[in-house]
Image (spheres, grey):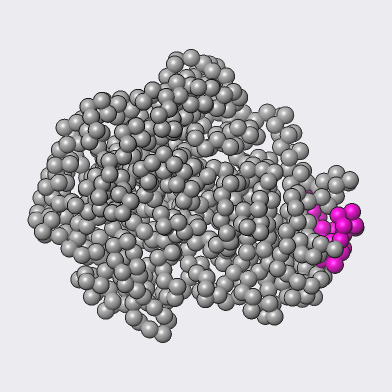
Amino acid sequence: MAIRKRVVVMGACVFLMAGLIAGVGVYLWRQHEDRDDDPPLRALALGPDVNVYIMKGGHSVYLVVNSFPAADRYKELGSELGITAKGRASPCTSSAPSGAALCVQWEDGAKLHITVASKTSPDLDCITMSWNVSQKRQQTNETPTDCYDMSHSFWYGAFEDHFQKWPMNTLKIGASPYVTGEIFDRVEYGEVIEPLFLSSLGMGIHADVNTPLYLGINAEASEGRICLTGRTGSNTPYLTQTIPSLRYDLCKAKDISTLWKEMAKKYLPKPRRTPSPYVVKFPIWSTWARYKSHINQTKVLDFAEQILRHNMTISQLEIDDDWTPRYGDFTFSTEKFPEPAAMVNELLGMRIHTTLWMHPFINTDSDAYKTASREGYLVCESANSPKPAAIDWWRGNGSGLIDFTNDKAVDWYLQELKKLQTNFNVSSFKFDAGEVSYLPKRYALASPLTSPNFFTTRYVDAACRSDMFERRLEVRVGFRSQECHALVRMLDRASDWTHKLGILTLIPTALVSGLAGYPFVLPDMIGGNAYNASNIDQTVLPDRELYLRWLQVTLFMPTLQFSVAPWDYDEETVKITQKLLSLREDYIDDILLLMDHARDTGEPVVRPLWWTDPLDKDALTCETEFLLGNDLLVAPVLEKGATSRDIYLPQGLWHDQLRGIIRYGKQWLRDYTAQLDELPHFARVDDQGIVG
């Protein structure tokens, strides 16, 4: 069954969108001595729809998109917000940078340039906002703060988060460095980030990738706002930058769907290849959640035989934690795996490929540490000392971290991976970690980076190069690494029903991954990681109901990942799992086509409901449903003990695949019944009445 694409944009919606955009403004406020009805000090048109007003004394800056009616010329949205620039403002005395349309400077040295950004599409208009500070102001180590009101629209950020809300309006995050971090330990921003933020009114922000960005969302002093600041200094991750700056583009389009597509073309790279079709057609199985670190050759082979004996399909078996003698070594533990090559070949005889868990850390007791420290392959503690920086991670303290800015270190790393592929017939790897948050407070790299986020980029690039043929690899981090063909795995999920890394975060995280330009999302293991709260190496079987609902949530995502097995419960769970996997097979061709489309366009495979209905409030706020492409709507049950849920159908006609009837869009289906073995899903019906 092929899914047909269909996007309907009505003239009335376009007219409504124009009215909404006309009510969008952003302002920067200092000491609000002037009244809104006072004439401006300066007014400048940056384009047919963008006007800037500098109020008397420079105490207010208003940027208006599609000018307000005359009676509301300088009306701002929301309450006033103070910024850190001091004194009065005046036109810049020094020459403005090339192409600048406006330059204003405050008495404390803060300088704002506003420039019309280069136009790449008739459907997108952007201006560049650029703050710089003088030597007089540099001692503060930060720029003024720009805040945008979220109270009149819905906002979406391209970052993973511990609670992962969609939209992000209810998140509360104090001003924090916008760098990749491990959210399992509740850092502010997560493993996959891009400096891209969109609002439902068709307004978008993209920060320059080299900006030392601090981002706050509903911070204590900025309730209802998203705030951007440039900040440097020894107490920040931006060690290579000494002068604070803030540079970002502010863009507008007719609606949020158009906005993402056009901003993605302008700012986000596209994948160059797709992952292997086999990891789409057949699930990945991992040893981690079921066995944790208690693995060996016998258990791996037995696990494979169990999978086949229960008539489950499999693309590859991932050997996870603790297969090496010590963490950081690049060979099998002979105690646990006496004949690894024979084991891998036996798995290949079952048509099961083998992948291995890898990471960038090297513990000091490993053989690899001796080589890496001697050759200078590790991140150093300072520019004046070749001593390796001491890194703490979940499997070691004082460990080394491979410096992926060092070409020789990368070559060595890839050579070691190649030996595993050559000597043991291993197909590919699961690359863990890679976040900036694992860099110490003080460190030195072989090649200094303009932004620490590029350390993540370099790590993913090395990972990508390890598997250019099989294309079975997975990573869990992403920054400016969209070109890689890796599956991008969600961080470990908790085996519960909550919004704290639980089942409720699966759909929002998949949507965020697509928003950030990573369409090949890999949901975490079905049922979650089965953690014991005090011992990560002990498996606590997830709730059976949670396990099956989790499978339903991820069934139509690009690929599936099992570890805890359905036969760990009962025979009925096995039968329900087989039934659901059979349902997925009906849509495999569609998913593969969407993967190819993602490679060509960068567009996500898993899409929000607003993708085809960008002006519908219910579609804009829905985080418990998603679209596979444009034409299959998926609405799993996400509440413990529930056998029904409310489902929203956006505009159009929809064929209810469970009930076999046609339903009209723009309506809620209240108390729609879905038993434990049922996944509600709806196929779009085209204008000729053909079901997609």
Residue 150 sits above or below residue 366 on the image = above
Percent of width and height locating residue 383: 42, 81
Closest to the observer, 527 or 342: 527
* Residue at 75% across, 53% down: 79
Left or right of 294? Residue 6 is right
Instruction: Give the magenta part as a residue range.
Output: 34-58
Please state the horizontal and vertical placement of residue 84, each as a whole percent of the image: 70, 68
Quadrant of residue 380 within the rendered picture = bottom left
**In which quadrant will I find the N terminus?**
top left
Q: Is residue 198 left or right of residue 657?
A: right
Q: Which of the 4 image quadrants contains residue 641?
A: top left
In front: 190, or 211? 190
Q: Residue at x 44, y 36 (%)?
A: 594
**Image side of residue 534 versus residue 225, left or right:** left
Taking the magenta stretch, the answer to whether it contains residue 45 is yes
Q: Which residue in the rendered view is the most extreme toward the front?
A: 534
Residue 554 shown left or right of residue 197 in the figure: left
